[in-house]
Image (cartoon, helix red, strand yellow):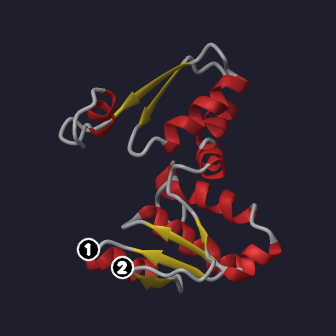
């Protein structure tokens, strides 16, 4: 249950995996990410745990509760900053994708005979990580991506429509 993660979302898996891959010099410089929610909170939480300075770029109209939850993990919120920080993308990073793919690894560990994974699609990091994991441990498993009917951004992207 991803709701049992500290930030109640799978996003912290990818953030932690990316942070653990930083060199000592990169850890000292710190990280920067863009997010209005779960990626920001997961990155801020694990950066604090690991002693890595974190700066989070949030949209101006981010809900106050999300801002407060992210700040509670000692992350600096900013509009922009270029101090040599390591950018941690919320989904378009191989190490973030690998961390998010641990969701599927745990599912196959619990139920090895899974033949279909139904995975929500936002930016694509979770489904990519799950597909890579499944290709290694259950190559015959089907991967089905789903998203809310009101926000079909992946469908629009595949059809060449504006998102």
Residue at 51 percent of width and 42 percent of height: 126
Q: Residues within 10 Å of mark 2 (few under 14, many from 20)?
A: many
Helix, strand or loop under label 1 = loop
- Measured as percent of width and height from the top left, residue 153 is found at 29, 40
Report the Cα–Cα distance between label 2 and label 1: 7 Å
- Marks 2/1 in contact by CB < 8 Å: the verdict is yes
Residue at 51 percent of width and 56 percent of height: 11
- Measured as percent of width and height from the top left, residue 85 is found at 61, 76
Question: Does 132 sit left or right of 149 as displayed?
Answer: right
Q: Quadrant of the C terminus?
A: top left
- Measured as percent of width and height from the top left, residue 113 is found at 63, 18
Helix, strand or loop under label 2 = helix
Seen as rendered, the residue at the extreme left is: 150
The answer to whether residue 69 of the structure is visible from this angle is yes
The image quarter containing residue 79 is bottom left
Tally of numbered discs = 2
- Measured as percent of width and height from the top left, residue 159 is found at 27, 26
Mark sitting on residue 63 = 1
Residue tagged 2: 67
The image quarter containing residue 139 is top right
The image quarter containing residue 70 is bottom left
Taking 112 as reference, is 33 above or below it?
Answer: below
Residue at 61 percent of width and 52 percent of height: 96
């Amino acid at each position: 249950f991803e709701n049992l993660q500290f930030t109640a979302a799978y996003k912290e898996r990818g953030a932690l995996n990316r942070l653990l891959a930083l060199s000592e010099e990169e850890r000292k410089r710190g990280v920067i990410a863009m997010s209005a929610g779960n990626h920001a909170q997961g990155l801020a939480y694990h950066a604090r745990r690991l002693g890595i300075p974190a700066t989070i770029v949030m949209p101006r109209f981010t809900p106050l509760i999300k801002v407060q939850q992210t700040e509670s993990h000692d992350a600096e919120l900013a509009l922009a900053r270029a101090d040599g920080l390591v950018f941690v993308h919320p989904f378009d990073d191989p190490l973030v994708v690998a961390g998010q793919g641990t969701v599927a690894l745990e599912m196959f560990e619990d139920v090895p005979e899974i033949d279909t994974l139904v995975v929500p699609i936002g930016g694509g990091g979770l489904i990519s990580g799950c597909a890579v994991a499944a290709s290694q441990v259950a190559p015959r498993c089907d991967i089905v991506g789903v998203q809310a009917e009101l926000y079909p951004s992946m469908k629009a992207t595949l059809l060449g429509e504006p998102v």
